[in-house]
C-alpha cells in the first residue's frame, strides 16, 4: 500500500471543508474528516479503481458528502491534488497536475 500525501492546496481545501461542516452542525466536521480518511485508505489500497479524469488522474467520490478526492498514483505515493466540492468549478484543479 502506498502512502497518501496531499498537495498544500488540497490540505487547505480539506481543512476549509472540515471547518465549514463543523460550523453547520457540531460533529459534522469530524464526520467529514472520517469519511475523507476512509476514502484515502481505499485509494491507497486500490489506486486504479476509480473514475479516470485523464491519463494519470483519478477521482473518488465521498459517499456522504458532495466532495471528491482528485489524485494521481505516483511510483512512491498517492498524491492528492484536490479535495473538491463536486458542484463548484469542476476543472479548477487542473493546473496542479504538474506541481
Image (cartoon, helix red, strand yellow):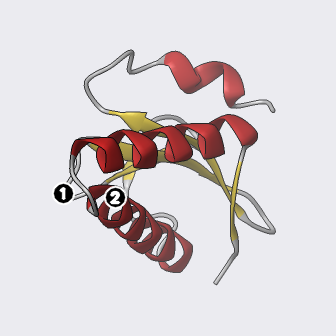
Q: Is residue 95 above or below residue 34?
A: above
Q: Is residue 18 above or below residue 76?
A: above
Image mark for residue 32: 2
**Numbered disc 2: secondary structure:** helix
Q: Nearer the viewer, mark 2 or mark 1?
A: 2
Please tell me in which quadrant of the rendered image residue 1 appears. Answer: bottom right
Please tell me in which quadrant of the rendered image residue 20 appears. Answer: top left
Mark 2 nearby-residue class (10 Å; few <14, some 14–19, many ≥20): many
The residue indicated by pointer 1 is 64
Asked if the residues shown at circle 2 and circle 1 are in contact, with their CB atoms under 8 angstroms apart, the answer is yes
Viewer-side residue, 75 vs 99: 99
The mark nearer the N terminus, 2 or 1, is 2
Image mark for residue 36: none
**Numbered disc 1: secondary structure:** loop
Residue at x 40%, y 73% (from the top left corner): 38
Residue at x 38%, y 21% (from the top left corner): 90
Q: Is residue 82 above or below residue 3?
A: above
Horizontal placement of 17 versus 64: left or right?
Answer: right
Mark 1 nearby-residue class (10 Å; few <14, some 14–19, many ≥20): few
Q: Position of residue 28 (x, y in %)?
A: 26, 58
The C terminus, quarter of image: top right
Viewer-side residue, 69 vs 58: 69
- Marks 2 and 1, how far apart in space? 8 Å
Q: Position of residue 78 (x, y in %)?
A: 66, 62
Residue at x 38%, y 70% (from the top left corner): 34
Viewer-side residue, 19 vs 75: 19
Horizontal placement of 2 versus 76: left or right?
Answer: left
Residue found farthest to the bottom: 1
Residue at x 46%, y 69% (from the top left corner): 37
Amino acid at each position: 500500500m502506498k502512502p497518501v500525501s496531499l498537495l498544500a492546496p488540497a490540505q487547505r481545501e480539506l481543512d476549509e471543508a472540515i471547518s465549514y461542516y463543523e460550523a453547520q452542525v457540531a460533529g459534522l466536521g469530524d464526520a467529514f474528516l472520517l469519511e475523507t480518511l476512509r476514502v484515502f485508505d481505499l485509494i491507497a489500497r486500490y489506486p486504479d479503481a476509480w473514475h479516470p479524469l485523464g491519463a494519470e488522474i483519478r477521482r473518488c467520490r465521498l459517499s456522504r458528502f458532495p466532495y471528491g478526492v482528485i489524485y494521481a498514483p505516483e511510483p512512491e505515493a498517492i498524491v492528492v491534488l484536490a479535495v473538491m466540492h463536486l458542484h463548484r468549478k469542476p476543472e479548477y484543479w487542473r493546473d496542479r497536475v504538474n506541481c
